[in-house]
Amino acid sequence: MEERIYNFSAGPATLPLPALEAARKDLLNYQGIGMSVLEIRHRSQVFAEIIEKAQANLRHLLNVPDHYQILFFQGGASLQFSMVAMNFLRGSGKSADYILTGSWGNKAIKEAKKEGTVRVVWDGKEGNYHRIPEPSELDFYPDAAYVHATPNETIQGVEFSSPPDTGDVPLVCDMSSDFLSCPIDVEKYGIIYAGAQKNAGPAGVTLVILREDLLDRIPENLPSLLDYRTMVKGKSLYNTPPVFAIYFVMLVTRWLRDEIGGLEKMAVLNEGKAKTLYDVIDSSDGFYRGHAEPGSRSNMNVTWRLPSENLEKEFVRRAKEKGLDGLKGHRSVGGIRASIYNAMPVSGVESLREFMLEFRSENGS
Ligand code: PMP
């Protein structure tokens, strides 16, 4: 096999090697059926088993209660920005509360405003989204249709350590970049959605976990594919789903369950990986400057600056030469971003750590 590099990009992101190997093995002939998963009918028994396994793995890993549906959509997390608002804000006679901690939350708000009244209960813009709010800074409207949050902002690298308490108002979370990174209490959420392409699989499928009683609130006459009830009734098979992406989610969740040993173990690994990088930043005498405040730091996306843009460019270039790819930060924050999702091995983070130390000793004052 040609050597693989360490891919620190924010998504599509690196995938677990055992899942890639399983997919390669299955590619031409899935379990003796004489064809690949890329070719099978979505209404075949073989695929029914695959989608059921993917759901069962997710239910097991996240301990999803029976009154929550696990659904597969297309359209990315971006379509969920619209769907959440179309299904639960449009025609509700209520407003929706949004906590704004970064770029993706901003996009969610833009779409929600097309459907109804949005109240931004907290906006981290002043500090260029370098922290999450304290609970005391959040004052939710008790009659809001829902509260929306982005627990991990991929671009800024800020993460909630626990979900905000919204009382009886359903909490809707865009978990695209922290989904499956640690255990969560699903009962605290009304809706969780996540594009798969960071922690759950390849691009092309979006996971939605939805509390069933919310379905009664959906207005009539939404386009069928944009009405959550359609996917519930059709068991995510109303139309042709992204068959291969769902199959891959099954492989990744199987890896998490059987090889990692569940989300508690995954969380310990993720915390260790993140600490390795934050420790280098914190002990660099200001050569590396983290974007996020220490109490708001993400375990998935570590963001930092160097003393100059030229050094940042040089850092990215030299890192790539060493097989450490995808480290250029998003233009709205600048600098460097290391996305260290579940599938990034500890050895990848160790290599980055060594490179950071070496680069500093060569270029620091
Ligand atoms: N939300 C978050 C937190 C993201 O990181 C991203 C993608 N990077 C999106 C939403 C948009 O996802 P998609 O491209 O699947 O629409």
Image (cartoon, rainbow, N blue to C red):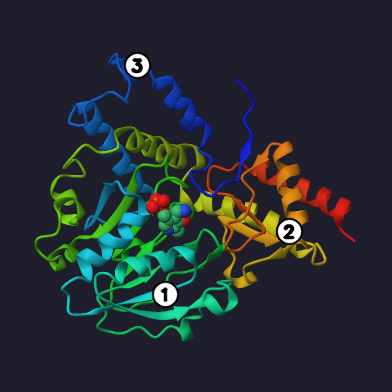
Q: For the N terminus, which image quadrant?
A: top right
Residue holding disc 1: 99
On screen, residue 128 versus residue 182, left or right, reads: right
Question: How many numbered dots are placed on residues in this image?
Answer: 3
Residue under numbered circle 3: 29
Measure the alpha-carbon separation of dots 3 and 1: 47 Å
Q: Amino acid at mark 3?
A: Asn
Q: Amino acid at mark 1?
A: Ile
What amino acid does circle 2 point to? Glu
**Disc 2 and disc 3: Cα gap in Å?**
49 Å
Other-residue count near label 2 (Cα within 10 Å), few / some / many at <14 / 14–19 / ≥20 = few
Residue occupying the point 60% across, 45% down: 8
- Upstream in sequence: badge 3 or badge 1: 3
- Taking the spot 31% from the left edge, 65% from the top edge, the residue there is 187
**Residue annotated with mark 2:** 309
Residue at the image position 64 percent from the left and 49 percent from the top: 327
